[in-house]
Amino acid sequence: MDNDYNIRQLGSDDWQLFREMRLRAVTEFSNYFLDNATNCAARDEAFWRDMLTNQDCAIFGLFDGDTHIGITGAFRWKESREDTIILGMSYLVKDYRGRSLSRLFYEARINWAKEQEGVNRILVSHREENAASKAANQNFGFTYYETGEVTFGDGKQDISHNYIYKLK
């Protein structure tokens, strides 16, 4: 079967698509995300629209034809805004996992990061047991640089492995 997968940056009018997919992600995997369903559900339309129009980030939607099947994001890192992009928020609907579609997420986010003035590195991380996330970042040449503890959306503190991709 030849699928018509496409990825595009979401805009303000896509706020409901974004909200629904993000809520789905943090509900299904609160143990992998930093956010949780309670927080996401409480946010109003303005929050979601603002996320999609913020010049310091890009939220992408992945589609199979017209069917929305995933989201991912790239953000200027608040601790080093001038030169660093951090990747996150990646979620793919269960029926589409295992098809190497994360490559579309990485391609879109890396391309966006390259377009941002002054950016010379991209960071990504994953929780200890998230082997799929590790495999995806390794396929794109990210290299390990540190391990730390993070509190995830499920309220538990766990190991987070961090990786870097140098643009320059």
Image: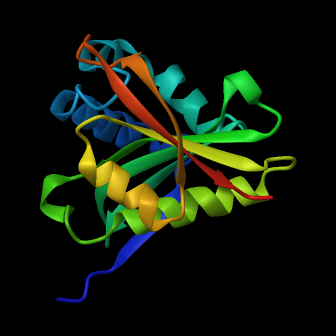
Which residue is rendered at x = 23% and y = 17% of the image? Answer: 154
Quadrant location of the C terminus? bottom right
Quadrant in the picture for residue 115:
bottom right
Q: Is residue 121 left or right of residue 144?
A: right
| Residue at the extreme bottom of the image, as rendered | 2
Which residue is rendered at x = 69% and y = 53% of the image? Answer: 113
Q: Relative to 7, is 39 above or below? A: above
Q: Nearer the viewer, residue 135 or 9?
A: 135
List x then y, in percent, for residue 62: 38, 60
Q: Relative to 56, is 79 above or below? A: above
Q: Is residue 116 left or right of residue 72?
A: right
List x then y, in percent, for residue 28: 16, 34
List x then y, in percent, for residue 36: 29, 19
| Residue at the extreme left of the image, as rendered | 95
Quadrant in the picture for residue 125:
top left
List x then y, in percent, for residue 47: 52, 21
Q: Is residue 140 left or right of residue 93?
A: right
| Residue at the extreme right of the image, as rendered | 118
